[in-house]
Image (cartoon, rainbow, N blue to C red):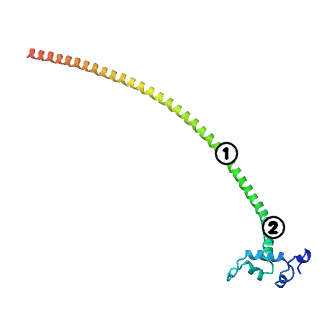
Amino acid sequence: MSDRASSGPASPNSGGKGEAFGMKDADEAVYSFAGSARTTPRHAPLSPQTPEQYTFFSPISPSTVATGSLQLLASQAEAEGTAAAAETARDISAWHQQQAAWERQTRLHDEQQAELLSEQWRLVREQTGSVAQELGAIKEQLRELKADSRQAVAEVERFLQDSEAKLAEERAARQGLADSVELRVQGIA
């Protein structure tokens, strides 16, 4: 007999048909049954078996198999669940830490972007004010330039009028001189 069978209490299904098939107790049968349920069968059964066929061919009853396999599956699920839960907890913790780091980075970037945006608006306001002042100065210079150009045009027009008047006087004086010279030449001749 195995160590498990000798160390634990005797199973009600021990002996008889179970030992004839090489199974020491119901726990081994359940373990064997549960283990075989996880492996892929190498061949498909010829026909589906009914519960009566299980009792005829099986050394243990279906209710014992179901109860034992449920206990085994429950204990395995609990062990796997604990490990999976711990791993899931680690994953969730890591995810929360990553999310917190991401939120801190996002908050920092948002603050920096807000500072940058306010600085940009300040610069835009300053530049707009500077442009407005420069436009005002340019407008004033244009007014002065227009006034100066009007004044210059008026002075040029006066100069031209004075020049034309002097030119007319000069022509009249030359014409008078030419006439007097001609009269003298005629008087001599």
- Seen from the viewer's position, the closer of residues 9 and 86 is 9
Instruction: Report the amino acid beneath label 2.
Output: Ser
In this rendering, is residue 148 above or below 69? Answer: above
Looking at the rendered image, the quarter that the N terminus falls into is bottom right
Q: Quadrant of residue 139?
A: top left
In this rendering, is residue 13 above or below 133? Answer: below
SS of the residue under disc 2: helix
Q: Residue at x 39, y 25 (%)?
A: 146
Side of 102 relative to 183 (left or right): right
Side of 161 relative to 115 (left or right): left
Q: Residue furthest bottom?
A: 20
Q: Residue furthest front?
A: 52
Side of 33 relative to 3 (left or right): left
- Seen from the viewer's position, the closer of residues 86 and 33 is 33
In this rendering, is residue 56 above or below 140? Answer: below
Q: Residue at x 12, y 18 (%)?
A: 182
Rendering coords of residue 39 (x, y %): 72, 76
Q: Check disc 1: other Cα within 10 Å, few if <14, some if 14-19, many if 20+.
A: few
Q: Which is nearer the N-term, disc 2 or disc 1?
A: 2
SS of the residue under disc 1: helix
Q: Quadrant of residue 41?
A: bottom right
Q: Residue at x 91, y 75 (%)?
A: 7
Which residue was labeled with disc 2?
75
What number is the disc on residue 86? none
Q: Quadrant of residue 71?
A: bottom right
Looking at the rendered image, the quarter that the C terminus falls into is top left
Rendering coords of residue 147 (x, y %): 39, 23
Rendering coords of residue 2 (x, y %): 88, 79
Which residue was labeled with disc 1?
107
Instruction: Report the amino acid beneath label 1.
Output: Arg
Q: How many marks?
A: 2
